[in-house]
Amino acid sequence: MLDKSLHRKNSSGESSSGATTASAATVLPPLQDRFGRAFDYVRIAVTEKCNLRCTYCMPEEGVDFPDPTAVLTAAEIQRSVETLAKMGVRKVRFTGGEPLVRKDIIEIVANTANTPGVKAVHLTTNGLLFPKYAKDLLKAGLTGVNISLDSLDSEKFERITRRTGLDKVLESIQCALDVGFKTVKVNVVLMRGFNEDELHDFCEMTKDQRVTVRFIEFMPFDAHQMWETGEHFASAANLVEQIEKFYPGIKTASGTRTEHHIFQAPGYAGKIAVIPAFTRSLCGNCSRIRVTSDGKIRNCLYSDDEFDLKALLRKDGCTEEDVVGVFRKAFDEKHRDGFEAKKKSTEKKINVADIGKGRTSMTQIGG
Ligand code: SAM
Ligand code: SF4
């Protein structure tokens, strides 16, 4: 059953009667699916390239597109954002790959922030280049930043990311707070036998810093390096249980739609969230549109169905109606939840050899 009650919140976590009816900027009917879900949040991957090689995400050699024209241009991204804003999209997140390796990222953020209807522009980054761009990003209109960090131990950080840089990431978190970003979150992929022993240390980051530390379930998009055995998976339910033990009497707090479990320890400045990204209890509240860096629309993280936005944008005479049409088609075909999406995608693969093919890294899907 879809939990429609949660549609009272928009993607920024604010209460509203629905972002699409709340703003005069919506000039087209809102983007909805056949189950009544409205989509007001787009995540756009701007590159597949990355300056880290996290073992749970990328193979050692990376997954870059050899052809630079494969990636959507700043103008193509802007055209897509403008159309989506007219259909009720209010929040845009740039991700990748590492979005800050893209040279025109400030221009992309500024264009988006100046788009009528867009209320929030966020970025997910590994933090390595963030201090260099923080002020310019804020000036360009970025409203929130999620910084990924999976270990507070430099040796373990290096093992997970195959690169050095823990100090730089910690500096980024402090810099995001100091520069004045209102929303600063730390994304932690929590894995058994890897960094689960750091759960408490990460929670303690919220004691004095007004950050939300978000524990994300490990998902099978790691280019098949670690997921296969299942031994590293730590469930959201188990993490919640541990957090409740650390802080008896911990209170639930308010958060975004995916922050299904969100807490604030008594007297602490920040919040702790657990994201059931794999167990998928969040599908009923889905409000996300995903656009991959090579310009494919994906209506679900767990579906292999793709809708070719880039080809359309590059066709002579492509109209706004055409762009609207491809987004509507993608969401007309969205499945009820991630389990059904996964099942259908697997069924479509007639040959056993095709199973497991497709996009296998979060950098290719747009994490
Ligand atoms: N490079 C940026 C970063 O690391 O923040 C943005 C892209 S990254 C793909 C976006 C988020 O996806 C990160 O928080 C990362 O930890 C998460 N991620 C990557 N692979 C994952 C996996 N297999 N399971 C769960 N989360 C994953
Ligand atoms: Fe790069 Fe982010 Fe993937 Fe790590 S999680 S390899 S930083 S894209």
Image: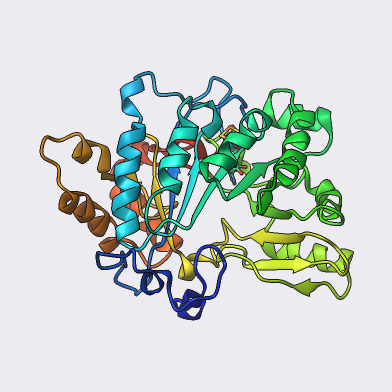
Q: Quarter of the picture for ligand 2?
A: top right
User: Residue 290 vs residue 169: left or right?
Assistant: left
Image x and y of residue 25, in percent: 34, 63
Image x and y of residue 219, in percent: 57, 48
User: Residue 197 vs residue 323: left or right?
Assistant: right
Image x and y of residue 18, in percent: 43, 74
Residue 194: tell me if it is visible: no
User: Residue 13 vs residue 42: left or right?
Assistant: right
- Closer to us: 19 or 364: 19
- The N terminus lies in quadrant: bottom left
Residue 193: tell me if it is visible: yes
Query: In the displayed image of the protein, which residue is found farthest to the left?
Result: 317
The number of callouts visible is 0
Above or below, 356 against 65 in this view is below
Image x and y of residue 335, in percent: 35, 63
Instruction: Identify which residue is drawn at 88% across, 67% down.
Output: 267
**Color encoding of the figure:** rainbow
Instruction: Identify which residue is drawn at 69% across, 54% down.
Output: 214
User: Residue 246 vs residue 264: left or right?
Assistant: right
Instruction: Identify which residue is drawn at 58% across, 34% down.
Output: 136
Above or below, 46 against 240 in this view is above
